[in-house]
Amino acid sequence: MHKKFTNIIFYISVIVSAVLAFYLFLQRFANLSAGFSYDELYSLATALPSLPLSRIWNEFLIKDVNLPLYNILLYGWNHVFPLEPFYMRLFNTLASAAAVPLVWFLAPKSWPQYPRFTLTALTAGSFLLIAFGVNIRAYSFALLAAFAFTLLALRIIDAVMQRIYPPKSLWAGFFITGFLGSYLHYFCSAVFFIAALVVFLYACAYKTGRKTAFWGTAAVFALWLPWVINTYQIMASPHGSWWYVAPLARSTWDTITFLAGGAVMAGFWLVFFIVSGVSFVHEQKAGIFKCPAVILPLAQIILLVITVLILSLKYNLWLDRYFLLSVPPFLLLITQCLTHLQKRHAILVLLLPFILTVWTNQYWKLDYLRNPEYTGLKEAFHFVSNTLKAQKVLVDSAKTGYPSDSFSLMLQYYIPKESPLRIEILTPQNAQQAFEEPKIPVLLPLCSQIHMIQASLDYNMEEDHPPLIFGKDVCVFTVHPIPEKAK
């Protein structure tokens, strides 16, 4: 009777999880028509089919700290499909959706059906993957690459542990997806090189495939290094800027709650991993290193955090959404914990539908489900053009973090059609124009108290009145010079 009851609970859990996962998988395609966010406008500017790729490369991509592969792929996509948010979001959504069957087919062959199903359901249902699946940035493709090389690394390690030299196709898939990931997002490259390190250490321990692991990783690193040098030169230059500034404690908590889905879920995951970890170590004891599906994601998460912490002493990289690239190892670790707990206590199979239910609730809370526009730029330019009747607007681009040549193209998208409004980048040389009558409005696309103060210092200007705020962080105001006594 007890076994029959356990089986019933197991099948109910699987069915409910499958339904929730399928529902959340479909939600990737539910909100493709929302307007562009500020960062997405840069993707638009660097993928305009009306511009030659040579200009985009020389004037935008090579001068930006972001890796270029995604923008080049989007440029090709925009030559085939209309230049509209729907089709550009669809490009990313297809990559996000592709991760779901990918994890099913690339999961190690030694895995039973339940952990394979669990990882697939978690990948389909992660509210983070859904939220950023429509984002017109590199995240969807970088996550797809991270899922691929992480699971391929597990397959390689499984073969190595049996002292079987992994097939060349397996090595090729690992290094090719690693190379692609390393040119999609810097955090993806970090996750790949950590995976490659773990593969190399297992290859050394079992004396199988050491040369291939070493030289393959070295080749990817050599091909990736030139862009790293270029990025360092940009960030180290006197004109380079890194706008994100936040106290470490606050940004750490923001990152934890971002990945966990809130403070309550952060507490749940803490208890979940402590209980799972203690139980797992107690069961495995000295054999824990023979469980690469636990060791690999743990190494990826821990070493990624340590690497970012060290680099942030010089350049602050501690930004919550960058840690999206820790989601593949995070889901892999959850899968191993759920599988272990279900084996120890069958009733804990209910944890999977519980997690997916919580993630469904998190999905319903996403901002873009309530707001069709991510940014206030559309309203701001409409106000400047139609209400103020301005012919020109001065835009402060100092804290935007993108090449100045791309900035006007980014904002041009939101100027009303048939409007004579012209965009001019605000500089110390032309700031004097803002003081003359009739006043030329000033627009800050990333408006905060810090940016307002910095703009005042940089351009010797003071607001005539409190700025008008559009959306969350776009502000428009007119200015006058700072009086001499106030300096």
Image (tube, rainbow, N blue to C red):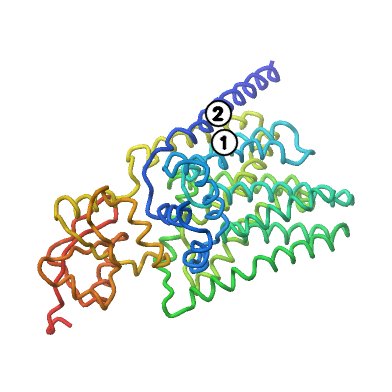
Give above or below for 229 relative to 47: below
Query: Residue 124 shows which numbered tag?
Result: 1
Mark 2 or mark 1, which has the lower sequence index? 2
Q: Which residue is mark 2?
A: 22
Q: Position of residue 214 (x, y in %)?
A: 79, 64
Front residue (pair 128, 398)? 398
Helix, strand or loop at mark 2: helix
Q: Do the residues bearing badges 2 and 1 touch, measured as CB atoms within 8 Å?
A: yes
Give above or below for 337 relative to 316: above
Q: Amino acid at mark 2?
A: Phe
Front residue (pair 208, 361)? 208
Disc 2 residue crowd, few under 14, some 14–19, many 20+, Cα 10 Å: some
> Which residue appears farthest toward the left when viewing the image?
437
Q: Position of residue 196 (x, y in %)?
A: 72, 59
Residue at 77% across, 46% down: 155
Front residue (pair 5, 153)? 153
Does residue 244 appear in the picture of this structure?
no
